[in-house]
Amino acid sequence: MQPPEPPGDEFALIARFFSELDQGASVVLGNGDDGAILALADHEQLVVSVDTMVQGVHFPVTAGPSQIAYRAVAAATSDLAAMGARPVAMTLALTLSEANEHWLKDFRLGLASAIEDFSLPLVGGDLTRGDLTLAVQVMGAVPAGMGLSRSGARAGDELWVSGCLGDAAAGLAVVLGELSGPQVSQDSLTKKFWRPQPALALGEALRGQATACIDISDGLLADVAHLARASGVRAEVAAGRVPQSSALRALTDEAQALRWALAGGEDYVLCFTLPPGAPAPDGCFPIGQITAGEGVYCDAEVEVYGYRHF
């Protein structure tokens, strides 16, 4: 006979707050075993990525649990978009200082919302005690040989982004009480910070079209530098062509808006390269070109490097 689990046991908490989130077309066996079993279609390859978020580093200590959950999953999912992968499943390692029932209920709401939005069933994970930390591992699938990477850009390619930049950095400034203005603009920017929308459909559409791709997490210039380094080329960014939202421009001056657009980070839009003359994807913006050489050049004086942990 199986002994009952203590009320505060991590397995009981997992069963109570994280069960029934594992339903998906590719899930053969989900939560509850030592591992999950996933099914891929014939001639598909698996894409795997993991992102960690730490309280006080990636989100403020005042953040609500639903906000934290959604943002963590969205940020990790953006890596699948950058690889051109369709979402398959995810796992979550969650470290908590205490097992607060109200906190966990709200966290589950944000988690369930992200799971539904991104078609990423939760098929496993871990729950431990310590400082609040989330590690989200996402798994996706691409047709064999069709995955996007950072390393295919060539001289002559055009450099594109899939949306406005700088909103997330400005949204964090609003959250921290460092920026204010019209409420509608504040709401728009904070939503971009808490609920980014990874460009999954675009990523899949770019298979066989884009020569290289990366998502903007560290800041546009920092991430373009990663792409240029991986491809062995030079990337030239025209600052005046980098798209900015009306909400961003409504809350700050032109110089600060440009700094956030070029180096703010965490917008989770895609930056990609296309051969000259390739069809322009809907809703995307050309911001520069790829040339022979190395590094990244921008005609505005903004620090290239984004956030660094060390």
Image: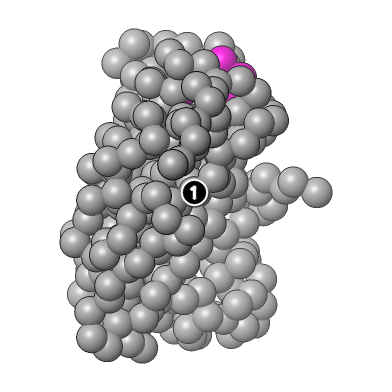
Number of numbered tags placed on the structure image? 1
Residue receiving disc 1: 125
Q: Farthest residue toward the front?
A: 1
What residue lies at 38% left-to-right and 20% top-to-bottom? 106
Q: Residues within 10 Å of mark 1 (few under 14, many from 20)?
A: many
Q: Which residues are magenta?
A: 60-65
Query: Residue 197: x and y, percent?
Result: 32, 44
For this rendering, which residue is in front, 208 or 44? 44
* Residue 112 lies in quadrant: top left
Q: What residue lies at 22% left-to-right and 79% top-to-bottom?
A: 41
Q: Quadrant of the N terminus?
A: top left
Q: Give the percent coordinates (x, y) of residue 35.
A: 45, 61
In the foreground, 294 or 239: 294
Amino acid type for the residue under numbered disc 1: Gly
Residue at image coords 39%, 44%: 74
The one of 212 and 309 positioned closer to us in this rendering: 309
Q: Tell me: residue 225, above or below residue 189.
A: below
> Residue 204's image quarter?
bottom left
- Secondary structure character of the magenta stretch overall: loop
Q: Is residue 64 magenta?
A: yes
